[in-house]
Amino acid sequence: MIVTRFAPSPTGKPHVGNIRTAVFSYLWAKHNKGKFLLRIEDTDRARFVPEAVKYIEEALSWLGISYDDEMVYQSERKEVHKEYAEKLVKEGKAYKCFCTKERLEKLRGEQEKNKRPPGYDGKCRNLSNSELDKLEKERKSYVIRFKMPDTGKAVWDDGIRGKMEIDYAVSDDQVILKADGYPTYHLASIVDDHEAGVTDVIRGEEWISSTPKHVAIHKALGFRHPKYSHMPHIIGPDKKKLSKRHGDTAIMDYRDKGYLPESMLNFLALLGWNDGTEKELFSHDELVASFDLVRVGKAPAVFDLSKLNWLNGQYIRETNTKKLKKEIETLYPKADIVKLDNFERILEVEKSRLATLEDITKDTDYFVKLPKYESKLLVFKKSTKENTKKGLRAAYEKLSSEKWEDDVEKLSNILAVVVEDTGLSNGDIFWPVRVALSGKENSPSPAELLWVFGKDESLRRLRKALRKF
Ligand code: GLU
């Protein structure tokens, strides 16, 4: 069975990149009818942000991603990690390092000066027993470092990149247990992946340089390492790695801006993956059915906001208006438009024009209050002032004398009858009625606006337009 995991470090609000990792790991597990686990990698106590766990869970649940089994807090397993670290020391595969912070800083300074790569120089690798005894008796604090092999290569078959080979020698001896007794990420994630039966580790390409260490530690512990798949970077339209500069990177900011979880999930899945066809709209279940790591590319994935907007518009159109209304009321309770009695109708007619839910709160003031507009806007470019006035008056009379129809199509038919009766053109009737109702050059159709405003308000706005002539 395929078992994947999402192993975020709880250091703040999850970013687009973190969550894409979760999405890919989730889809790969579910595609294979396997398990997707959630593990909070909180052993770096200095960077731990307690609310971050809540944010992570919120983001996953928003996107409709559920994890299997219980969520694991890595720090709660610190005794287990310690045992493994000590086992490695006993077997001569790791060692206690007593080097002080000052020494390490000095070492780094010298390496920098001599343009040498940074890294631990192995001073404590070969301490004699008597030296060790002495240091321990003095109760000097120490860390445990893993002895990286001096020769050989880490070789792995990357699920996305194929065969990978990196010399062990390029990695220095990593700290695996800190002086505070907490493991570092390198040890903890390996032990936890192993004990949880994780078969596939899917993560960002920034981890490639750490993989030789992981391969070596797995070997030293007698574990088989999982299959690694390193995903491509996400870049902005300027081809630079996605960062704050490009706008929002925190995933939940997208919810607040009015993106639907369906579009976000779809969009994230397309950041590096496609199904080999031109298809771009994938529901949750379709993603599970078609996702395949084989079709994840190595090339950086461009975060294209216009594509996200397009996808979001598609999903908004497909979503039930009542549901959208609820969502908008929760997101933007203070917006004037939300408080209108006819808000649901407004949404119904505006829905097809929205890229985000937030758009309904922008440029839609005309529903709340008729804006000021100039009389010449009422005149269609192929019409004349005279014909416009005639058309508008005829429409007004028909609408005020006929039984009011609460139906867009029937309202549209009434206007068509006015065109016929008067012998005027569409542009002499439909255009000015629409402008009279919205005060704007662009808006939904006149029949839709009549339906939204109802008889009284519609006639009031039409009278106002007639007074302009
Ligand atoms: N805790 C690591 C992170 O935050 C996990 C890396 C991995 O998936 O191995 O990115």
Image: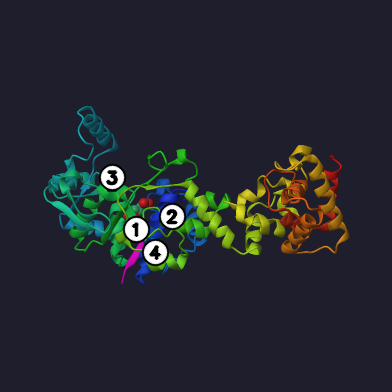
Whole-angstrom CA distance, mark 4 to mark 2, is 11 Å
Foreground: disc 2 or disc 1: 2
Displayed quadrant of residue 80: bottom left
Instruction: Tell me: residue 3, above or below residue 188.
Output: below
Which element type, helix, strand or loop, lies under badge 3? loop
**Would you place residue 153 above or below residue 408 in this image?**
above
Pointer 3: residues within 10 angstroms few (<14), some, or many (20+)? Answer: some
Q: Quadrant of residue 288?
A: bottom left
Q: Viewer-nearest of labels 3 and 2?
A: 2
- The image quadrant where one finds the C terminus is top right
Mark 3 C-beta closer than 8 Å to ligand 1: no
Locate residue 118: give its quadrant. top left
Q: Is residue 175 left or right of residue 288?
A: left
Question: In the rendered view, does 350 fall on the left or right side of 179?
Answer: right
- Residue bearing mark 3: 141
The residue to which callout 2 is attached is 268
Tell me the CA gap for discs 2 and 1.
33 Å
**Of the pair 364 and 413, the residue shown nearer to us:** 413
Secondary structure type for disc 2: helix
Q: Which residues are magenta?
A: 1-6
Identify the residue under disc 4: 27
